[in-house]
Amino acid sequence: MARKRSPIEFGRSPRVNLLPERQRAEQRHEQTLPKLLLALVASGAVAGLIFAAGTIPVTLANQELAAVEAESQSLNAQIAGFGEAQEMLAAVGGRSSDRTVITETEVLFMELRDQVLGSVPDGSSIVRFAASLPGSETDAAPDPAVLDACPASGASIDLTLSTPGEGGLSAAAAFLDRAEQLEGFVCGIVIVNSLLSAGDTITSETQLQLVFNDTVRAGRFIEEEAQ
């Protein structure tokens, strides 16, 4: 193989490197080392940038996930609170329904009694008053066949009208005429009339029964339930 010749340069002084090969290698090493260090630093910087570029999306995703989890926990807590509120509302609604059912046939008998007392003729008085709901154990209908013509759907009142003298039936008739003006009045029945004597004093006692329809029911919670 032909030996490669060094190019001939004209106009320059001849130069000859007389340093031993070991020293020349050390010089080349010293010249190359900064370049290697610079390359390592550049490679490290590039690797750092690549790592940062890969880490930033992950960090942002983790932050977004943490925010979503926090919001989810907050919503779950609110839902739990709503659940308790719904249970309370359901319980209240159940109580309201029970109350409505229980009071569906309720009649305020004291108010009805005051209205009945206002129909008593002058000179007469009520010595016995008993009110009951239809079908109750206290319903004192003496003859159901008589009440078929005017069945009680609201309330029944069994009372005894006391009248001085023997005019008990006349007082009872006047009393029933006035009672017809009462709201919910269906009919009135004279059950029995009897005379009581104490010495020279005669008193007529007339037992009657008044029948009312369901308009006398109180209905205290109907409007509230409708709202």
Image: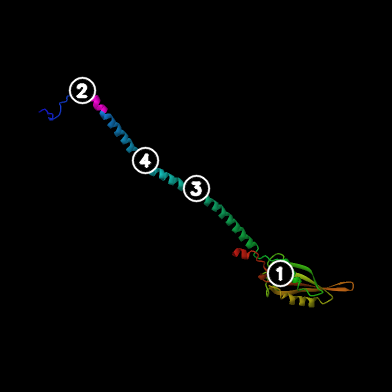
Residue drawn at the location 64% of the way across and 60% of the way down: 99
Taking 142 as reference, is 165 left or right? Answer: right
Label 4 sits on residue: 52
Query: For this rendering, which residue is in front, 226 or 30?
Result: 30
Q: Earlier in the sequence, mark 2 or mark 3?
A: 2
Look at 62% across and 63% down and name the residue there: 224
Circle 1 residue: 156
Question: Bounds of the magenta span?
Answer: 18-30
Task: Choose the circle earlier in sequence order: 4 or 1.
Answer: 4
Horizontal and vertical percent for residue 213?
A: 67, 71
Q: Is residue 215 above or below residue 87?
A: below
**Looking at the image, is mark 4 or mark 2 earlier in the sequence?**
2
To which residue does mark 3 refer? 73
Q: Which residue is mark 2?
A: 21
Residue 147 or residue 11, whichever sits in front: 11
In 3D space, how far apart are the residues under numbered discs 1 and 2 (Cα atoms)?
A: 136 Å
Residue appearing at x 33%, y 35% in the figure? 44
Residue 219 lies in quadrant: bottom right
Q: Amino acid at mark 3?
A: Gln
Left or right relative to 224: residue 49: left
Give the percent coordinates (x, y) of residue 92: 60, 57
Mark 1 vs mark 2: which is more N-terminal?
2
Q: For mark 3, does the 10 Å Cα neighbourhood hold few (<14), some (14 to 19), or many (20 or more) residues?
A: few
Residues under labels 4 and 1: Cα distance? 92 Å
Spatial separation of the CA atoms under disc 2 and disc 3 = 75 Å
Residues packed near mark 1 inside 10 Å, few (<14), some (14 to 19) or many (20 plus): many
